[in-house]
Image (tube, rainbow, N blue to C red):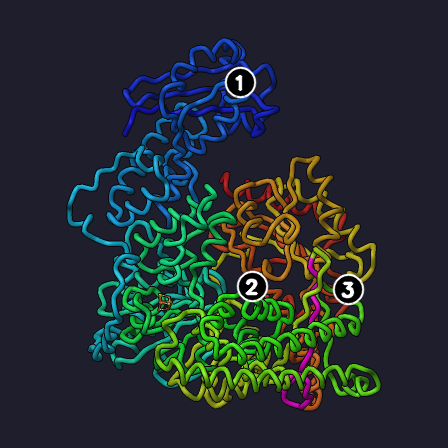
């Protein structure tokens, strides 16, 4: 490497135009170093002083920047300046007239050298130094260490990737002076430069005799865990483990409710391993969230399978993988598309990612909008995939994972992939047992999977992209003059169809009554259908069906022509291949669309109108099966030897579990087990019910809730999660509490206003002084252990919004069976979500906190069902109090906690 100087500044804020430098540290590659405090002439804000541990006495006596600069300039003027996020520091110096010739930003280069990391702060690379960071002198030392680590990582890349980086980054790459000396690692080509045909998959291994029982295996694992794994003996875990084992042996369908902290993953993986090894059969484990899927793969599976000849594979939906063929195209086009500097850096990172990853999975990486856009260009798109004929079929990440599945004992999948398999029978290899974690979500995924969803405007956009005059397909058609008439015919028919659909969407928007919810849903029932007869609506719908039928004729003709002409070689031309795939899917789409307008007792049709913030409505046509039980029975329960459905919340309190009925589980195979959470609820938590909370339907409710939050949030300096039931209520509350809380130094993070859930949850974790307001996805998708979350407020009991068409149809069905929809469906459904919301608070044995329910319907004296909600919770002490006394009692709880720890 050429000589360099590492630079770091500490400043009074983040704005070069208004904030001042108060510390500079420099370190030359020849070993010289220089550090000084600077008197900024303004006060250093307290959070920055604490963060940087600034020595205020030394700063008061330090010279001003004008005196220091002449000493700094010679260090920087002739040498490459290195820094972590160095452009931030350089912006401050530029304001003082200091310019540098060249710089290297270790933050940008770390993204390239370590593409599978998701965080790139110095603290992420050097967690052991976290207490010393943000002192300029420490930061330059760590930046220099990182600089050398980056160089080593770049030097390990395959030669072909290094050549690509040199082409794309030019002099910035050459600065590192990486010499590709021949060595075993240098011989390795990036998969992009190493296409190969697909090998045959390995066969499933033969059965292996197993001489342990499941309890013994759990015990032995506990004896041998490493020092980095926390291990507690938990009777609850043992109980679930033995029950799952029994269900697998006896062919049951088990509902296993296991409270948070039970350790249920290991409790089902061990029996799964035993079954798979002894019988040579396969077990599918399906989760709802990617987070749990990853946790099983990275943490629980390696532990459970330690020392056993067992194979597992993590399978995700196809769209999550990187497509090498598309990446190859993007790399080849870089000089056309890659002129923007940000895109060049993103492309460089993509190429190193391809060289180092062994799974090609989008969730390995995180980045900015440029990175996300680039990723979308290279992710697997089944419309483009040419399957076994692809030159990359051998190294293809998606196909490799599917091949590995053929010889694996355990497949770790998500609900969506499992349901895709139930629908097509092709997404997974055969399996004998299924374990469904987070099983309370399965029903919704089945509804969506087996139902029909047609977002009109998105489909029209796709249609335009496909058939507009300058599309790739239109250009191919020019090469085949005799195909042109067919193509133009179809183009014309689709224009008609597009117009018809667009008019139809407009009509539905006009027909939709207003709603207080974010998405308007309107059911297409018999009365509405009859009403259509008296208006122009019926004629419009019939016209739409006619254009669909006409287009279908054109589709069939063009498809037949393409197939007879090209046969197996159709996939050689990707644009034509994509067209053919789209044409093949068209009849099914057309069939489902026409079914949308038919009313029958088995399905329910509706349309949804979602108003985007830019004012444009999104119109979606949907239909779903009223009952999913028969579908699951036919496609899943009857096909497997055993099934285990587990979650912390399965609503097992009633006589016949609600989930068992909904999911169509045969009572003769049904078994249940429920074990409580092993936490010490007496000491770890309190539940407070706001006795005099107003009715949530009344306007004064929001003022009362806001006043309560403004008073309560400062007790723990934020660390509060407020769970609401609609985006509109998030907005109502956010504008009431934001300014008053800001005055107390507490930030409000509102879902959909301050960012998407993933982003605001991360901010909440990092910034202790925040209140997080969220809706549906935060009721359950959030895991914030430790002190970052200490107060959870459940603003309303989470009953579904009235008038959801599918829910309404189900209620009618339940009424026909002589039962009460409220007690058999609405209530158990709301209780599961209530349990989930409550469960956000205590995630580990050391967590402490309070939950407040701010809904009068939880008062046992107000509703008959209040007790059912309370009984569904773990054994937490609860107190019913007027709102005015809640802050005092919450404070008292924390004082008790401090006293407890002081003892
Ligand atoms: S097989 Fe399909 S997904 Fe895989 S690299 Fe080829 S085109 Fe892409």
**Residue 597 lies within the magenta run:** yes
For the record, the magenta segment spans 596-612
Q: Dot 2 corresponds to which residue?
A: 874
**Residue 169 lies within the magenta run:** no
Q: Position of residue 881 (x, y in %)?
A: 73, 54
Q: Dot 1 corresponds to which residue?
A: 96
Q: In this view of the protein, can residue 520 be seen by the observer?
A: yes
Q: Residue at x 69, y 59 (%)?
A: 612
Quarter where residue 387 is shown: bottom left
**Which quadrant of the frame does ligand 1 lie within?**
bottom left
Give the mark, 2 or 1, whose residue is nearer the N terminus: 1
From the viewer's perspective, is residue 19 above or below residue 509? Answer: above
Give the mark, 3 or 1, whose residue is nearer the N terminus: 1
Label 2 secondary element: loop
Q: Dot 3 corresponds to which residue?
A: 516
Q: Alpha-carbon neighbours of circle 2 within 10 Å: few (<14), some, or many (≥20)? A: some
Label 3 secondary element: loop
Q: In this view of the protein, can residue 872 be seen by the observer?
A: no
Q: Identify which residue, 633 or 557, lies in the foreground.
A: 557
Rendered-image quadrant of the N terminus: top left
């Amino acid at each position: 490497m050429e000589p360099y100087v590492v630079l770091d500044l500490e400043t009074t804020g983040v704005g070069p135009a208004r904030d001042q430098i108060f510390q500079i540290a420099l370190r030359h590659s020849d070993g010289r170093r220089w550090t000084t405090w600077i008197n900024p002439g303004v006060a250093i804000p307290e959070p920055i002083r604490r963060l940087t541990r600034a020595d205020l006495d030394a700063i008061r006596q330090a010279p001003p920047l004008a005196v220091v600069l002449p000493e700094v300039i010679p260090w920087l003027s002739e040498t490459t300046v290195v820094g972590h996020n160095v452009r931030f520091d350089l912006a401050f110096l530029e304001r003082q007239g200091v310019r540098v010739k060249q710089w290297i930003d270790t933050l940008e280069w770390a993204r390239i050298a370590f593409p599978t990391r998701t965080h790139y702060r110095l603290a992420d690379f050097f967690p052991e130094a976290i207490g010393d960071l943000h002192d300029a002198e420490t930061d330059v030392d760590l930046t220099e260490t990182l600089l050398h680590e980056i160089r080593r990582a770049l030097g390990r890349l395959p030669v072909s990737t290094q050549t690509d980086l040199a082409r794309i980054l030019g002099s910035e790459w050459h600065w590192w002076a990486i010499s590709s000396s021949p060595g075993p690692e240098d011989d390795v080509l990036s998969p992009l430069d190493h296409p190969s045909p697909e090998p045959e998959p390995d066969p499933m291994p033969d059965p292996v005799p197993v001489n342990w029982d499941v309890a013994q295996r759990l015990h032995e694992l506990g004896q041998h865990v490493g020092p980095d794994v926390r291990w507690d003996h938990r009777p609850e875990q043992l109980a679930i483990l033995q029950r799952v084992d029994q269900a697998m042996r006896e062919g049951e369908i088990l509902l296993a409710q296991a409270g948070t902290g039970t350790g249920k993953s290991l409790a089902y993986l061990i029996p799964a391993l035993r079954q798979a090894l002894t019988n040579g059969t396969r077990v599918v484990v399906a989760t709802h969230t990617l987070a749990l899927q990853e946790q099983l793969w990275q943490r629980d599976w390696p532990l459970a399978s330690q020392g056993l000849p067992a194979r597992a594979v993590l399978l995700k939906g196809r769209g999550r993988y990187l497509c090498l063929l598309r990446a190859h195209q993007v790399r080849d086009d870089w000089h056309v598309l890659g002129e923007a500097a940000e895109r060049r850096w993103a492309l460089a990172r993509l190429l190193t990612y391809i060289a180092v990853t062994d799974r090609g999975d989008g969730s390995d990486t995180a980045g900015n909008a440029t990175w996300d856009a680039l990723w979308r260009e290279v992710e697997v798109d089944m419309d483009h995939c040419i399957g076994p004929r692809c030159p990359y079929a051998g190294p293809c990440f998606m196909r490799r994972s599917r091949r590995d599945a053929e010889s694996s004992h355990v497949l770790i999948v998500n609900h969506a992939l499992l349901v895709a398999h139930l629908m097509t029978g092709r997404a997974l290899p055969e399996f004998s047992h299924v374990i469904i974690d987070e099983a309370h979500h399965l029903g919704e995924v089945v509804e969506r999977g087996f139902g029909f969803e047609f977002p009109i405007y998105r489909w029209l956009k796709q249609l335009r992209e496909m058939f507009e005059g300058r599309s790739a397909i239109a250009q191919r058609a020019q090469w085949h003059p005799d195909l042109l008439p067919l193509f133009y015919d179809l183009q014309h028919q689709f224009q008609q169809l597009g117009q018809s659909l667009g008019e139809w969407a407009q009509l539905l928007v006009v027909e939709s009554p207003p709603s207080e919810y974010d998405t308007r849903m309107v059911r297409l029932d018999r009365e509405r259908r009859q009403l259509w007869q008296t208006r122009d609506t019926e004629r419009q719908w019939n016209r739409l069906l006619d254009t669909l039928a006409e287009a279908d004729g054109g589709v069939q003709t063009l498809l037949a022509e393409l197939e007879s002409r090209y046969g197996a070689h159709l996939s050689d031309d990707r644009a034509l291949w994509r067209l053919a795939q789209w044409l093949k899917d068209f009849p099914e789409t057309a069939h489902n669309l026409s079914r949308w307008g038919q009313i029958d007792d088995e399905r329910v049709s509706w349309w949804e109108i979602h108003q985007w913030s830019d004012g444009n409505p999104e119109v979606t046509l949907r239909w779903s099966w009223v009952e999913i039980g028969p579908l699951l029975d036919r496609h899943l329960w009857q096909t497997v030897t055993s099934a285990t459905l587990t979650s912390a919340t399965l609503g097992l309190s009633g006589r016949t579990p609600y989930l068992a009925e909904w999911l169509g589980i045969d009572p003769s195979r049904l078994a249940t087990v429920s074990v409580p959470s092993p936490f010490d609820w007496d000491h770890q938590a309190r539940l407070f019910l706001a006795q005099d909370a107003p009715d949530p339907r009344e306007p004064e409710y929001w003022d009362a809730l806001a006043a309560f939050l403004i008073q309560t949030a400062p007790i723990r300096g934020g660390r509060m999660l407020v769970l609401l039931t609609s985006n509109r209520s998030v907005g109502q509350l956010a504008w009431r509490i934001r300014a008053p809380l800001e005055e107390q130094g507490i930030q409000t993070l509102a879902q959909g206003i301050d960012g998407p859930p993933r982003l605001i949850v991360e901010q909440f974790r990092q910034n202790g002084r925040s209140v997080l307001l969220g809706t549906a996805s935060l009721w359950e998708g959030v895991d914030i252990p430790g002190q970052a979350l200490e107060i959870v407020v459940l603003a309303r009991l989470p009953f579904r919004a009235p008038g959801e068409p599918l829910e309404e149809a189900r209620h009618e069905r339940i009424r026909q069976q002589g039962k009460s929809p409220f007690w058999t469906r609405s209530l158990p459904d709301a209780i599961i979500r209530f349990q989930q919301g409550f469960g956000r608070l205590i995630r580990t044995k050391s967590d402490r906190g309070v939950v407040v329910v701010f809904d009068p319907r939880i008062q046992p004296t107000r509703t008959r069902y209040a007790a059912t909600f309370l009984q569904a919770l773990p054994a937490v002490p609860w107190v019913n109090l007027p709102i005015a006394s809640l802050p005092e009692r919450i404070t008292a709880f924390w004082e008790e906690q401090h006293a407890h720890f002081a003892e």
